[in-house]
Amino acid sequence: MPTISRPAWPNSRKAAGTALLLALAATLVPEAASAQTVSVSAVSHQSPFDCGKTFYANNWKGGHNPSGAIDWQNYGGESINGKTVRATAAGTATFHNEGNTSYGKWVEIRHADGSRTRYAHLSSMVRGVGATLSVGQGTVIGTVGSTGGSQAPHLHYEQRTPSGAMDTSPTVNGVTVSLGQKKAIKSTNACGGAAPAPTDNGGGGSGSGNRYTPQQVCGAGFAVIDSAPLTGGRAYLLYNAGNGNNCVVTLKSSNVGKSTPVSAFLEPKGQKPVTDKGNYGYYAGPVKAKAAGVCVKWGGTIGSASYASDFEHCD
């Protein structure tokens, strides 16, 4: 930032002029103080993983490019491969793919204060290359993988200043990880309360909220990569990086527990569509198909409301 020079006052300033200067200063000081308060406060970052997940944040000292980036790695007996990756703070996400080099599939998010975060070596992303997406803290942006120049599944994560410089001591969930440190951090990202365990998908009951989540319906290893609103609910597209399967489920948010028409469908390009359709109390699906590296159409209906995508998510 350029240095602002101050005017040099003549030494021969008269007393009256000095008094006038002091009076003017007294009236201007509050304005200067007020101007300083409009600067944007620093963005607070949470862990890039689901609520309650604990993984190691490793800030290598020496040999890591760029220096100051965090490698999120396995913790305890839990593998990080295929885990859902979430935005650590709100902003605008842009999606990239370097192929078999460098970051591989990666996302950059620009935040309100001009700073940026980067999430690299992803196995999947929720949007295609070059797309942008407005995200909140906790929005799903992809899944952990080992694309690009990675040697093993992990999430490469960076925090950069508005000028683009690396923050070599990034802070997530209130924990600062400086160069040479490796810390286990438990995520509080997207913590909205645990969903009740699934029971049935029949009619009957009168619950006001849906007891299911898309991950519960599709099963272990699946992460949400896209969704579309419907009147009375939402359709979800999920992906399992471990087996290359996609999954679609349509969840109700109104008339929950009552048997009403609901459907979900999934169509990998070159294959026949898979559909589940009926009168359900909570959801339609799951419909699954193997679609690694294949474009898919997907969607669903709730009553007369419907959503059907074009062929997309081809990575």
Image: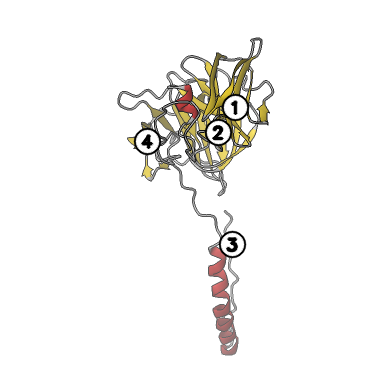
Residue extending farthest to the bottom is: 16
Residue receiving disc 1: 262
Q: Secondary structure at mark 4?
A: loop
What is the spatial separation of the Cα atoms under label 1 and label 2, in whole angstroms?
8 Å
Amino acid type assigned to the residue bearing label 4 in the image: Gly
Residue receiving disc 4: 52
Q: Nearer the viewer, mark 3 or mark 2?
A: 2
Q: Is residue 177 left or right of residue 150?
A: left
Amino acid type assigned to the residue bearing label 2 in the image: Lys
* Res. 66 in view: no
Residue extending farthest to the right is: 310
The x and y percentages for residue 180 are: 34, 35
Where residue 287 sits, quadrant-wise, is top right
CB atoms at circles 1 and 2 under 8 Å apart? yes
Q: Nearer the viewer, mark 2 or mark 4?
A: 2
Residue receiving disc 3: 4
Question: Mark 1 or 2 closer to N-term?
Answer: 2
Residue receiving disc 2: 252
What is the spatial separation of the Cα atoms under label 2 and label 4, in whole angstroms?
26 Å
Q: Nearer the viewer, mark 4 or mark 1?
A: 1
Amino acid type assigned to the residue bearing label 1 in the image: Val
Where residue 295 sits, quadrant-wise, is top right
Q: Nearer the viewer, residue 133 or 25?
A: 133
